[in-house]
Amino acid sequence: MPKLKTNRAAKKRYSYTATDKVKRTKANRRHRLATKTSRQRKTGKIQNAYADKTVEAGIKRLLPYGN
């Protein structure tokens, strides 16, 4: 059986926790922060959010070895 390839785009966006949840970074935190409200900036500060259960199976298929 050949090895499975890891999707490189998914590897940059997602990672696994110790309990096998899929961790992701919230969007809208990279640039143009001056035009956003303080509420948008504050809620976007969360760097470790979890992926939704509906897409978790697809992400795990893209990252077969855990990364």
Image (cartoon, grey):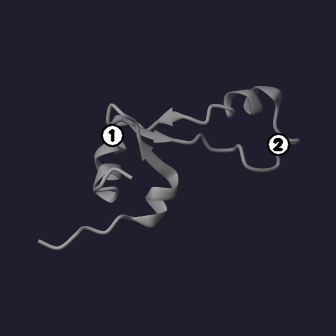
Q: Is residue 36 above or below residue 62?
A: above
Say which quadrant the N terminus sits in.
Answer: bottom left
The circle drawn on residue 15 is none
Residue labelled with disc 1: 54
Label 2 vs 1, first from the N-terminus = 2
Residue labelled with disc 2: 33
Name the residue: 29% across, 55% down. Answer: 65
Of 18 and 42, nearer the camera is 18
Q: In the figure, is residue 51 to the left or right of 32?
A: left
Name the residue: 88% across, 41% down. Answer: 34
Q: In the figure, is residue 11 to the left or right of 47?
A: left
Disc 1 secondary structure class: helix
Mark 2 crowd level (few <14, some 14–19, many ≥20, 10 Å Cα):
few
Name the residue: 17% across, 73% down. Answer: 2
Quadrant in the rendering for residue 28: top right
Mark 1 crowd level (few <14, some 14–19, many ≥20, 10 Å Cα):
few
Quadrant in the rendering for residue 5: bottom left
Q: In the figure, is residue 50 to the left or right of 59?
A: right
Name the residue: 22% across, 70% down. Answer: 3
Name the spot of residue 7 as percent of width and height, x first.
Answer: 39, 65
Query: Which amino acid does the dot numbered 1 rest on?
Result: Thr
Find the distance from the CA under tag 2 to the CA under tag 1. Answer: 30 Å
Query: Which amino acid does the dot numbered 2 rest on?
Result: Leu
Point out the residue furthest to the bottom here: 2
Q: Is residue 8 above or below residue 21?
A: below
Of 1 and 42, nearer the camera is 1
